[in-house]
Structures are given as C-alpha cells and as structure tokens.
Image: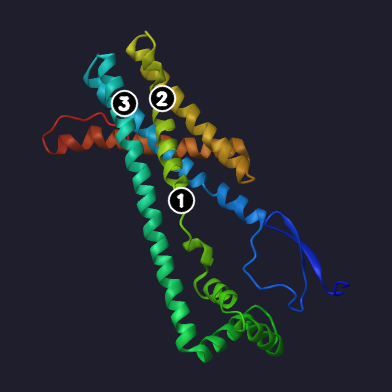
Amino acid sequence: MSEPRNSSAIDVDSRLLKVASRGKHAPRIPDTIERRRLERQRSIRQIVFGVQDGVLTSLGIATGIGSATSDRTTILVTGALSLLVGAISMGVGEHLGNKAEREVIENAIDFERLEMLEKPEDEFAEQLTYYRLKGFTDAEAQTIVERLAKNPDIWLHEMVRDEFGIDVRAAEPAGPAAAFGMGGSFALGHALPLLPYLFPIALVTAMWGCLAFAVATLFSIGVFAGRLGGRNPIVKGLEITSYGAAVFVISYLAGHFIPPLFGLHPVAVGG
C-alpha cells in the first residue's frame, strides 16, 4: 500500500516512524531523543548546587575547626562526618523536594482532567482561545481543537501545557538518580578541598591548599556548566567561583562581627 503524499518521517524513540496526517497511527504524546537528552542535561542544577554547597562546607570546617585546633585528625574526622551527614541530607532533601513538586503538578493535572470531564464545552472554548492567541484563524483553531477533543490524552497534554506551562510528563517519578546526583555532587565538592589535610604538611599550608582546591573545583564545575549550556566556559567558571567566594566572605564576616554584638567571641565560619 502506497504512503500518503502528506506523510513525513521523524525520529521518535530511536525508531524511524512514518507519520501520516490521516490517522494511520494511534495518536500519542511524542517523545524524542532530544527531549530525553535535555532532561539529563538539566541535572546540572543538582551538580552545581551540590558541589558549591559541599565546597563551602569544607571551607567552613577548614577555617572554623582549623582555627580552633591544631589537630589534623580532628579536622579530617569532622570533615568526614560532615560529608556523610551532608550528602545524606542533600540526597534526601532533593528526593523529598522533587516528590513534593511532582505532587503539586499531579494535582494541577488532575484538576484539569476533572474540568475536561465536567465542563468540556468551557474547556473547548478555552483551548480555542489559546490557539487564536498563537496566531491561528478561527477556522484553523476550530479544526485543531475538534481533532484534539477526539483524543483525550493528547488534549489533556495540550491543555496542561497551554494553561499551566508544564508537560504532563513532569509528573512522572524521577527515580533515585536526582537524589544520588545531589548527594554525590555534595560529597565530591566537600571531599576535594580537604585533600591537602591528608598529607604531612603544615596546617597553614594545608589551609591554603584547601582554598586552592575549593577555587579549582568551583571553576571546573563552571567550565562544565558553560560547555553544557553553550556559554563561554571561562566566563561561566569565573561566575560560579565569584558567587562561591562571595558567599564565603559574607558568612566569614558574619561569624566575625555578629557574635561580639551579643557579647560572644567571634566565630570562624565559612559556609
């Protein structure tokens, strides 16, 4: 059987599917390799956040604990415990945060689905308005929405996208990858600045080494983020490093000047 003249071929789900405009295939929400790739790349948020938080926590330990004791073991044990607790906390927090966000999205989708069942005429008119806003004529909008109304799942996808600005797939479970990514990036950012304390060098030298490792880690993450986002990697590296430095300086100054206002000794903090 010959293919319709108005058919085309698109790469979906790693397969080349023939897509015809006369209903030759069951309608479904399209999924592409590019969409899934972008979803993976968006995990850069967890990496940047986790690494920066880990780096600043390490600096806080190096400056705070390091100024209170000259015992290298104390600094390393404190750093190891902070790394373990922080990584677990960050991972659990990411998991619970994503879960709460998905529940909000699910509630919005369920609300829209109920409206489409109880007030289909109103939702039909609303969808017509959205397509008119996109530049379609009344006749074109009418044709599109009539076709959508025959396929409830696709119509729901379009309504949720137009009304709430979200994709129904945003309600799908994220799995453990995000939580492990956040916890792992925190652990990485936390561990690297503390490496100098593993070597038999003077504590002052180790502290400066910790600072150097922290700067190098932040800059490297910025370079990675810049390349992933199509930005100048050097500029992005300097941006993230400067933000990290600003947070450290502010927290250090707060620990130095605020406690004396309450009759307390200055506290050396770094994050």
Identify residue type, mark 1: Gly
Name the residue rendered at 11%, 35% in the picture. Answer: 263
Q: Is residue 270 visible?
A: no
Residue named by callout 3: 79
Identify residue type, mark 3: Gly
Residue named by callout 1: 175
Name which quarter of the figure residue 198 lies in. top left
Distance CA(mark 1)–CA(mark 3): 29 Å
* Label 1: how many Cα within 10 Å (few below 14, some 14–19, many 20+): few
| Percent of width and height locating residue 132 | 64, 83
* Label 2: how many Cα within 10 Å (few below 14, some 14–19, many 20+): many
Distance CA(mark 2)–CA(mark 1): 30 Å
Name the residue rendered at 66%, 88% in the picture. Answer: 142
Number of the front mark, 1 or 3? 1
Q: Which mark is residue 193?
A: 2
First reached walking from the N terminus: tag 2 or tag 3: 3
Identify residue type, mark 2: Pro
Number of the front mark, 2 or 1? 1
Whether residues under marks 2 and 3 lie with C-beta atoms below 8 angstroms apart, the answer is no
Say above or below: 53 vs 213.
Answer: below
- Please tell me which residue lies in front, 245 or 121: 121
Mark 2 secondary-structure assignment: helix
| Percent of width and height locating residue 80 | 32, 26
Whether residues under marks 1 and 3 lie with C-beta atoms below 8 angstroms apart, the answer is no
Whether residues under marks 2 and 1 lie with C-beta atoms below 8 angstroms apart, the answer is no
Q: Is residue 255 visible?
A: yes
